[in-house]
Amino acid sequence: MSLQQTISEGAKTAVRELYSANLESVELQATRKEFEGDITVVVFPMLRVVKGNPVQIGEDLGKYMVEHIKEIKDYNVVKGFLNLVISDSYYLDFFDAIREDKQYGFVSPSKDSKAVMVEYSSPNTNKPLHLGHIRNNLLGYAVAQVIKASGKKVIKTQIINDRGIHICKSMLAWEKYGNRETPESTGLKGDKLVGNYYVKFDKVYKEQIAEAIASGKPEEDAKKEAPILIEAQEMLRKWEAGDKEVVKLWEMMNKWVYEGFDQTYKTLGVDFDSYYYESNTYLLGKDNIEEGLVKGVFFKKEDGSVWCDLTDEGLDEKLVLRSDGTAVYMTQDIGTAIQRVKDNPNVGGMIYTVGNEQDYHFKVLFLILKKLGYDWAKNLHHLSYGMVDLPSGKMKSREGTVVDADDLIVEMTETAGNISKDLGKLEGYSEEEKAEVYKTIGLGALKYFILKVDPKKRILFDPKESVDFQGNTGPFIQYTYARIQAILRKADFDWSKPAGNIILHEKERELIKQLEFYPEVIQSAANDLSPAIIANYTYDLVKSYNSFFQNVSIFGANTEKEKQFRVQLSGVVGNVIKSAFSLLGIRVPERM
């Protein structure tokens, strides 16, 4: 039983014993800093069942709880708030229990527990990953890590959008203007090379539209009848018909892109357990539509198109199959979800990491899957997130104005290097060591800046601001971790055994209380699908540690026991920082 549960049950018992009344619940708060105490019992809600002066009720409860609960050593009452002072022995016992637990806060999944499938990344194979993909990947990966730490099995997956007119645009432009160049011949990553031809297609397309308009053609007709667009549409028809030459070109260029993506994923530190490809899944779902028609989930209109009526749920009618029998995105997503559970029978729910412009789509998808009778459909979640903006404005792939993910990672590493050089933090390091630390700091800054924000919020990303060594930033937290490792290296004595009974300094108590929150924080982040909860907890822990470091002498302690305990406390804080950052996919440097 946690301390909060012990206090809550103790307060209920006290009310029953003293007033012959029953409390359904007890409201607890952290004691405000201006008052002595650790946990506060709010008396006012009790007045519904206990009649009397709230101050006197607080006095009665405080006296009873000091006598009957060994963890409580004192109390004080301020108006209707009972502030409880927890004994040092409780905090020391708790600290000793977690001191050597490298997995502290993590819960192992039970053998028969269902898995959660987390989908993220899901790029198009006509362009490299960009800043928007970075937020998607970091969020999806971190949510998967947090859910796993909370005690569930996790399968990380993605669906790759490798078919359609946009893919054919890159293919056609390369065929017409590429002169057979390859990633090897150009020295470019494959995804960048293919992305260049997507931009090239758009440039030629716009030129053809401008020429047609100049010759007197209406703009709408000029857009529809541009020769290069008609060629791309023909290429798509050939691909769908299985034309050998087109399929061969498609396979070659997609291979280039996959190799490029893999390099970016490796640098970014994200991975996947399985992959789905739209070229394999785009025909899925049609059988499920037929099944839904039989069940009465869908209905057919006079033109033969199939719809789902969601007006009872406050939505509208949704098309699931066109009149010519071709699928829409919804059809494919229905079929893919069902296929994933067939492929992974232990999956009990799914999380889709997709931008908030798709909120309505997923609301409809989940409702339809529930209507089809799949019990796992109640465990489907859309991890909806806001866009990432730069000070320079919105990004556009077609015009080549996106912020390339690889370029941004390089820029972050360079920014970290320049700031570190100015601060003189890496004197005595070899160039190779410096390069590794710069990369760790730069990527840590990028990841933390994005993940510390609630997923639903839009982000204005400023690379230089994110690499600041002060404030709520990744480098600030990484620097504190490196400082702790320096303290542990300096401790030239055996500090591995329990320090025994000591009188805790106020700053030590605050720090242990922060450590106590960690398991609860992991569960909360998993429930809310919000890595921001982990990020901001870590910042609070680091602030608490730095306050301790500034106010309490570690190596100048009055006794050997105190010195030993303070080194141990530093070590545990370091472990929790490293653990929390691992959930965010952020590395911590041993020296900095």
Image (cartoon, rainbow, N blue to C red):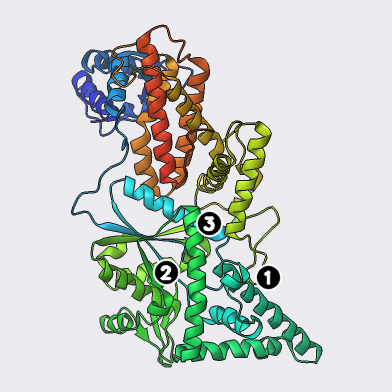
Does the CB distance between marks 3 and 2 fall below 8 Å? Answer: no
Along the line of sight, which residue is nearer the eye, 61 or 484?
484
Give the amino acid type for the residue marked by disc 1 in the picture. Answer: Glu
Disc 1 secondary structure class: loop
Sequence-wise, the earlier of marks 1 and 3 is 3
What residue appears at the point 32 percent right and 49 percent down from the top-left corner?
148
Disc 2 marks which residue? 159
Left or right of 467: which side holds 373? left
Disc 3 marks which residue? 134
In the rendered image, residue 223, in percent from the top left (x then y), is placed at 68, 86
In the rendered image, residue 269, in percent from the top left (x then y), is placed at 46, 52
Disc 1 marks which residue? 399
Give the amino acid type for the residue marked by disc 2 in the picture. Answer: Ile
What residue appears at the point 76 percent right and 89 percent down from the top-left corner?
212
Sequence-wise, the earlier of marks 3 and 2 is 3
Across the whole image, how many numbered discs are drawn on residues?
Answer: 3
Along the line of sight, which residue is nearer the eye, 240 or 379?
240
Along the line of sight, which residue is nearer the eye, 237 or 188?
188
Q: Is residue 314 visible?
A: no
User: Vertically, is 127 above or below 113?
Assistant: below
Mark 2–mark 1 Cα distance, whole angstroms, equals: 25 Å
- The circle drawn on residue 384 is none
In the rendered image, residue 222, in percent from the top left (x then y), is placed at 71, 88
Crowdedness of circle 3 by 10 Å Cα count: few (<14), some, many (20+)?
many
Give the amino acid type for the residue marked by disc 3 in the picture. Answer: Ile
Disc 3 secondary structure class: helix
Along the line of sight, which residue is nearer the eye, 251 or 456?
251
